[in-house]
Amino acid sequence: MTIVEFILNEFRDEAPATRRVLERIPGDKLSWKPHPKSRSLGELAMHVANLHGLAENIVKSDEFTAMAGSPAVPKTVEEIRAAFEKNVRAGEEALRNLSEQAAMENWKLVYQGKELFRKTRVAALRTNLLNHLYHHRGQLSVYLRLLDVPVPVVYGPTADENPFV
Amino acid sequence: MSIAQSMLRELEIQAPITRRFLERLAEDKLMWKPHEKSMTAGQLAYHLASVPGGVIRLVQNNPAQAPDFSRIGAFPQPASREEILRTFEESIATVRDVLMRLDDRAMNETWRLMADERQAVAQPRAEFLRDVMLSHWYQHRGQFSVYLRMLGAAVPASWGPSADEPPLFVQNAQAAQAG
């Protein structure tokens, strides 16, 4: 398996677990947050959905310009799910067409006209997309728990669901 | 770079960040939990500490026997933060030791996990390590960040900034300037 195939498989194989988590988001709790400093449920879920869009960006562009200001606030769960599905499709398509050579070329993050960092595309996909996504999906699982929503299986059993028994 | 080398490089970057999370758990909050169905902060911290070493030990055998995942209450409750941090250091040391003995052939070999007589997992060893030693570890660190937030602790920066700290590349640049 090449590095790009490994990343593509992981991106595709992780999507169902993320979809399970997003499907449980209660539409009437989008503005709920566990602490005043926390992102709201809607902001966090939208961030998870939007993060998937980074796949297409990393593959097709040489740089990403980060925007200042507030996080995207969705009005409905449908908006979150639609963004997720669109980004997953576009991301898979982009990753299928990523050559090993392009994967080892640099991609950079720019903020207010200044380059924050540069790294290979494959490193950006690994760190800024995938690993970063798992972190926020984990946070979402705690949000669901606090809202008394049954927590779906991601990597292993939850207090509500156990794939091993 | 071999698969093992690239995983170890990632782990060496992430381990100090995870340690920072564990250090921020107040000693008197080990029994705290955000919800009656949740792990306690101590259980979650101990799990975060022991995952890397436990997973790398697990893949040494092929097939391996699955641990008992049937009850959340089965997760050990540490008695002190010191116990968590000691477990963490041992865990990371185990990865350093075992991971580099796995060449790419061993990484690409199909690895099997048995739950009693049933085959629960059959996938390339590298894939299982990626999913369970790393991705699953990041998921729990994300969960732990919400615990720290709810406990009023300052949340460390990790993949990006937290509400309390700028991103790590900014912190590193500031440290280099100060140093």
Image (tube, coloured by chain):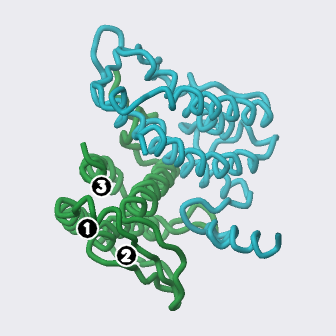
Viewer-nearest residue: A75 or A141: A141
Above or below, B118 relative to A73: above
Q: Is residue B96 left or right of residue B117?
A: right
Q: Marks 3 and 2, Cα distance to the nearest angstrom?
A: 15 Å
Q: Can residue A29 be seen in this snapshot?
A: no
Kind of residue at disc 3 = Glu
Do the CB atoms of the residues marked 1 and 3 lie less than 8 Å apart? no
Above or below, B171 relative to B131: below
Subunit of mark 1? A
Residue under the image location 41 percent in, 13 percent down: B65
Upstream in sequence: badge 3 or badge 2: 3
Which residue in the protein does label 1 denote? A87
Kind of residue at disc 1 = Asn
Question: What hue represents chain B?
Answer: cyan
Residue A98: % across, % down? 22, 63
Which residue in the protein does label 3 denote? A23
Q: Is residue A32 left or right of residue B28?
A: left
Q: Residue extending furthest bottom?
A: A113
Q: Marks 1 and 3, Cα distance to the nearest angstrom?
A: 16 Å
Residue B63: % across, % down? 35, 14
Above or below, B24 relative to A44: above
Which residue in the protein does label 2 denote? A74
Subunit of mark 3? A
Residue under the image location 42 percent in, 40 percent down: B2
Question: What hue represents chain A?
Answer: green
Q: Residues within 10 Å of mark 3 (few under 14, many from 20)?
A: some
